[in-house]
Image (cartoon, grey):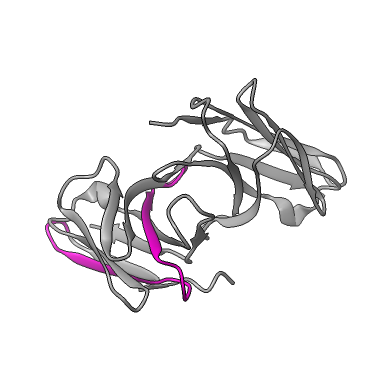
Amino acid sequence: ETGVTQSPTHLIKTRGQQVTLRCSSQSGHNTVSWYQQALGQGPQFIFQYYREEENGRGNFPPRFSGLQFPNYSSELNVNALELDDSALYLCASSLVPGDTQYFGPGTRLTVL
Amino acid sequence: QKEVEQNSGPLSVPEGAIASLNCTYSDRGSQSFFWYRQYSGKSPELIMFIYSNGDKEDGRFTAQLNKASQYVSLLIRDSQPSDSATYLCAVPGNQFYFGTGTSLTVIP
């Protein structure tokens, strides 16, 4: 167990809807990174937050947004869902950016 | 942008054999390298990381790093059916850059 939790486990949405995914990092870990993993692919970096500030962003459109809170929890919000957003969404926490990342169990999002 | 390349496989080995998984990376300045294991439908779990050239052993796992060749590998000795999974190589920068993973099947 990594001590990183995510909710919900599974989610089904329809195209055009909005979704919020949640993550709780290990206590003391100031950094959270979010990844999207499509079937058969490696995790793709969405963005990272360090001490509640965005600390880097991958090649994802602005409809992917996030927040990090002082209590080591964070959110990934996706607006205007598209079919291609169907994937496993992973959060990973680390002490500081670049340090070992520990993954949560993931949220499986299906967009119909 | 760091690129990480892995042979997607699938790689099949008999139980008890040595499985060898390979990874190459593009950024010569990369200093550390991570191996994660991912079972089907689950999230990646850390196996080990390596910083220095040479070998690093942890139980049945050995990571090998050759910075001159920009090559890192993972050896699994005495492979077990429970080792059947996808193995991801990752290189940290501002983010973790992952390869596409190598699928390993250990045949009983």
Which quadrant of the figure has residue B64? Answer: top right
Screen quadrant of the C terminus of chain A: bottom left
Which quadrant of the figure has residue A91? Answer: bottom left
Horizontal arrangement in the rendering, residue B89 relative to residue A89 (left or right): right
Q: Position of residue A58 (x, y in %)?
A: 29, 43
Residue B26 drawn in magenta: no
Screen quadrant of the N terminus of chain A: bottom right
Q: Can the viewer see residue B27?
A: yes
Magenta stretch bounds? A15-43
Q: Nearer the viewer, residue B91 or A70?
A: A70
Q: Position of residue B92 (x, y in %)?
A: 48, 43
Outermost residue to the bottom? A71
Query: Residue at 43% across / 71% down in the picture?
Result: A25
Residue A25 drawn in magenta: yes
Q: Is residue A105 above or below residue B25?
A: below
Q: Is residue B30 above or below residue A111?
A: above
